[in-house]
Structures are given as structure tokens and as C-alpha cells.
Amino acid sequence: MKQRIGTPLGLVAEFASPEQLLEAIARLRARGYRQLDAFVPYPVKGLEAALDLRRSGLNYLAFAAGLFGAGFAFWLQWFVNHHLFPLNIGGRPSFAIPVFIIVTFETMVLFAGVTSFASLFWVCRLPRLAHPLFSVNGFETASLDRFWLGVNADDPTFDPEGTEAQLTELGATRVEMARGLT
């Protein structure tokens, strides 16, 4: 969805420690907030559970692509070697499964790997060289030593003034509004 310039996307709040961040997430979720996101400089134990994040479905997509690649490679080798151009060399069969295994395996890995890579980029909307959060004052500390919590403006319980007051009450050192760029 395209955002107009100046459209509020939500609030982001800076916290000094991961414990404060986890406590703020738990308290906001208890108050009914569901569209929360965290920006942290290193992995924080329990953050996925606190945000109630689901497991990604990319592994199932990669598995399906790998199966398709293996089936395609096996079928292609059979079609070319047995059906289109069968050769009788030394009495060997034209349809010899052990010969097809290496190419089938390599094609399976290729399809699964390329699908995983492309799907991850598509799901994450990469490459993204500009994002509204990049213009928030101090947000660069999310990759250094601070912990940021984002509350999406689309959340049903979002109220700019009320949410800002709640974030400040929960111990946020700074609360900023993120606004759309494009």
C-alpha cells in the first residue's frame, strides 16, 4: 500500500534495555495492541513469543520447489535419454535410475535455493533503500545499543496521543511519530 508524504505510519519508542522492551510489549498486548514490531541490535530471547510471531512458510515453499525441481530433472532426463534419443551403448538400458540421481539431486538443491532466496527478498520487500523509519530521529541506535518498539497506526487500539502517553508511562526514553515518504 502506498503512503502519502506525511501520513502517520505509527509510533516508535526507544527503550534502554531488552527487559524494558519485553515488559512494554507484554503490557501493550494486554491492553489490546496487536500490530507491534521490535527493532533490536542483537537477538533478544523471548522476543518472538512476546510479539506472537508465526513461523515463516518459506520452508514449505522451498520444499515444494525442491520436489518440483527433482521431479522436473528426473522427467527431463528420462524424456531425453529414453524417449527422444535412446542409445544402445554396450547393452546398457536407456532408462537407468542410478545415473539420473546426481543431476536430480543437484537440480532439487538449485530450485529450492533459488526459490528461497527470491521468496525471502519478495517477502521482505528487498531491496528497500528508503523507509520512513530511517528518518526518525535517533533510530540509527537500533543497530547499536538501543531497543525500539513500533506500534502500527493500523492497529484498532491505536490513538496517537494515548499510545504515546502509554509508551512514555512504560519507560520509553523517546517516542517519535513515523510518517510516510512516498
Image (tube, grey):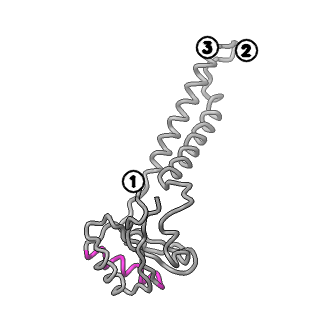
Q: CA distance from mark 2 to mark 3?
A: 16 Å
- Image point (50%, 40%), residue name: 65
- Based on the displayed image, in which of its 4 quarters is residue 50 positioned? bottom left
Q: Nearer the viewer, residue 63 or 135?
A: 135
- Image point (58%, 22%), residue name: 78
Number of other residues with Cα within 10 Å of mark 1, as a class: few under 14, some 14 to 19, many 20 or more: few
Location of mark 2 (residue) = 89
Most distant residue in the right direction:
90
Number of other residues with Cα within 10 Å of mark 3, as a class: few under 14, some 14 to 19, many 20 or more: few
* In the rendered image, the vertical position of residue 72 relative to residue 33, given as above or below: above
> Would residue 85 be found to the left or right of residue 52 on screen?
right
- Image point (43%, 55%), residue name: 56
Q: How many labels were placed on the picture?
A: 3
User: Amino acid under label 1?
Assistant: Met
Q: CA distance from mark 1 to mark 2?
A: 61 Å
- Based on the displayed image, in which of its 4 quarters is residue 32 positioned? bottom left
- Image point (50%, 35%), residue name: 68
Q: Nearer the viewer, residue 60 or 173?
A: 173
Q: CA distance from mark 1 to mark 3?
A: 50 Å
Task: Give how far across and how far down residue 82 sits, in percent.
Answer: 61, 16
Task: Give how far across and how far down residue 149 sits, in percent.
Answer: 42, 75
Secondary structure mostly seen in the magenta stretch: helix
Which dot, 1 or 3, sits closer to the camera? 1
Location of mark 3 (residue) = 84
> Would residue 156 be found to the left or right of residue 120 on screen?
left
User: Amino acid under label 3?
Assistant: Leu
Location of mark 1 (residue) = 1
Q: Magenta span covers which residues?
A: 16-31
Task: Give how far across and how far down residue 34 sits, in percent.
Answer: 31, 67
Number of other residues with Cα within 10 Å of mark 2, as a class: few under 14, some 14 to 19, many 20 or more: few
Say whether disc 1 or disc 3 marks the residue closer to the N-terminus.
1
Which dot, 2 or 3, sits closer to the camera? 3
